[in-house]
Image (cartoon, rainbow, N blue to C red):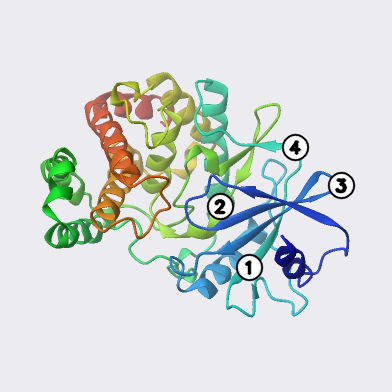
Amino acid sequence: MENLVKLLKEFQIPDKEYSFEVISNGLINDTYLVKENGEPTYIFQRININVFTNYETLIHNLDLVLPLLKSDTYSEVELCKTKDNKSFFQSEKSEIWRLMTYIKDSVVFNTTDNPKIAFEAGRIVAQFHKLLENFDAAKLEDTLPGFHDIGLRYDQFKNALKNTDTDKIETAKKAITFVKENISFLLDIDHSKLPLRVCHNDTKLNNILFSKEDKALCLIDLDTIMKGVFIYDFGDAIRTVANAAPEDEKELDKINFNLNLFEAFVKGLATEKDLFQEEEKKMMPRGVVLLPFLHGIRALTDYLENNRYYKVAYETQNLDRCFSLFQFAQLAIDHQDAMGKIISKNLK
């Protein structure tokens, strides 16, 4: 931790005695909670430049968008400046570090069975989009080009399939079959009919901060803010709001699709119902298939490529992730009509 103390001194913050606690639920960056006298004060992160190779673009996007993400009902997260007045610090080892303010007394949920949490998640996602409604999304650069491009992800999967070993193909046989049977349903989405928006692109439930009174405060983990379409944020939120099982759940019968929580989330969105165009509403149910499928095919591809991208605790964790995500994608396919009716009723 001595190195962390030294690095922290590069930022324009009070010169005090700080302690550090590892935050381990992120899959990409190394994250530390910075405490002063035991009280959380900042979030300190080393950006994974193997994933975010164009990290300067990432910081550029945040510098543009973060000042707009604040209101009476949306808590502000700020990037702390370095002593050189930059939004990140490059260490002697060429590591990229950034420091953000911490929102006091905030909590996160990995999953929920509480309709109030689901409603608040929908409300804060709608707030995020409302606050950025008039910002020109074209000003943002792609930090992860093709992040939600299903065609690209399918090509990467096919390439991995050609180059992996036969044992992996056999172990992943069921998942591979699922991809081949369902890919056309998602390749058929016409993105040109959907308005370009500033999207968070990673709106899983544990990327939303809540107060201890279960009020949603803001979205966090903002590295994926880029141009996109709303069904990305909608689908990614629903995959964790409407399903109580963790992303790598091995017992697939524990994965569920809770329509009551789905409707609570949609009612949260309805607090800003004028945001959404008719084509967006029409495509929202398909977005609930697209995002778990995308995450699933990425996890499957990573497994076939020997776990190069995601952090794993054991060799087949990515395979477990993809089985779990595909199970939810199948449930989302089964619930297309039910989701459409709920959206029509609440987002008229």
Secondary structure beneath dot 3 equals loop
Taking depth in this image into account, of 262 and 164 the one nearest to the observer is 164
Res 325 → quadrant: top left
- Mark 3, residue position: 37
Res 93 → quadrant: bottom right
Above or below for 155 versus 260: below
Say few, some or many: other residues with alpha carbon within 10 Å of mark 2 (under 14 / 14 to 19 / 20 or more). Answer: some
> Where residue 237 sits: x, y (%)?
44, 39
Mark carried by residue 97: 1
> Where residue 5 sits: x, y (%)?
76, 64
Mark carried by residue 234: none
> Where residue 139 sits: x, y (%)?
49, 70
* 3D distance between C-alphas at marks 3 and 1: 23 Å
Taking depth in this image into account, of 178 and 222 the one nearest to the observer is 178
* 3D distance between C-alphas at marks 2 and 3: 25 Å
- Mark 2, residue position: 221
> Where residue 144 sits: x, y (%)?
40, 65
Task: State left or right for residue 15 relative to residue 21.
Answer: right
Number of numbered discs on residues: 4
Q: Earlier in the sequence, mark 2 or mark 3?
A: 3
Task: State left or right for residue 86 relative to residue 139.
Answer: right
Residue 219: tell me if it is visible.
Answer: yes
- Mark 4, residue position: 105
Name the residue at 59% across, 71% down: 96
* 3D distance between C-alphas at marks 4 and 2: 17 Å
Res 280 → quadrant: top left
Kind of residue sitting beneath label 4: Asp
Mark nearest the camera among 3 and 1 is: 3
